[in-house]
Image (cartoon, helix red, strand yellow):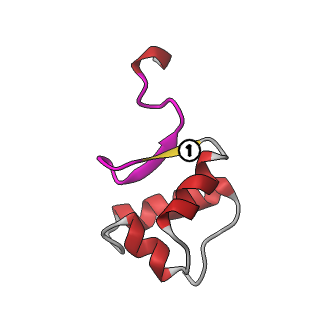
Amino acid sequence: MEFLPQDPAILVSSVNMLLRDEEFDTLESLSYNFGKTAQEIKDYLRNHGFVYSNDQKQFRPLGYDDPETK
């Protein structure tokens, strides 16, 4: 992958895949590789309804882990 996709759904899928398949061990190393900061990616995806889980090392929909929404 030469660049990060701009579409939020494809970006979430791509980042989660790269982290899951251990292409990168952290969001910080992934973002550095693509010329972004981890915070830029987090902010962009938060604005599109996703939040990063440090425990799971993946982006999830806002409210996914909230017991009140289940």
For the image, the number of numbered tags is: 1
Residue 65 sits inside the magenta stretch:
yes
Q: Up-down: is 62 above or below 41?
A: above
- What residue sits right under mark 1 in the picture? 50
**2 or 44: which is nearer to us?**
44
Residue at 43% x, 73% y is 30
**27 or 70: which is nearer to us?**
27
Residue at 54% x, 35% y is 62
Residue 16 is situated, as x and y percent measured from the top left of the image, at 45, 58
Residue 68 is situated, as x and y percent measured from the top left of the image, at 45, 15
Q: Image check: 65 left or right of 69?
A: left
> What residue span does the magenta drawing correspond to?
53-66
Residue 1 is situated, as x and y percent measured from the top left of the image, at 54, 80
Q: Image check: 31 left or right of 24?
A: right
Residue 30 sits inside the magenta stretch:
no
Q: Is the magenta stretch mostly helix, strand or loop?
A: loop
**1 or 41: which is nearer to us?**
41
Residue at 65% x, 69% y is 5
Residue 10 is situated, as x and y percent measured from the top left of the image, at 62, 59
**Residue type at numbered disc 1:** Phe
Q: Image check: 22 left or right of 28?
A: left
Q: How crowded is mark 1: few (under 14 residues within 10 Å), some or many (20 or more)?
A: many
Question: Is disc 1 placed on a helix, strand or loop?
Answer: strand
Q: Which residue lies furthest to the right in this view?
A: 7
Q: Up-down: is 3 above or below 15?
A: below
Q: Up-down: is 12 above or below 5?
A: above
Which quarter of the figure is the C terminus placed in? top left
Residue at 48% x, 72% y is 31
Q: Image check: 11 left or right of 6?
A: left
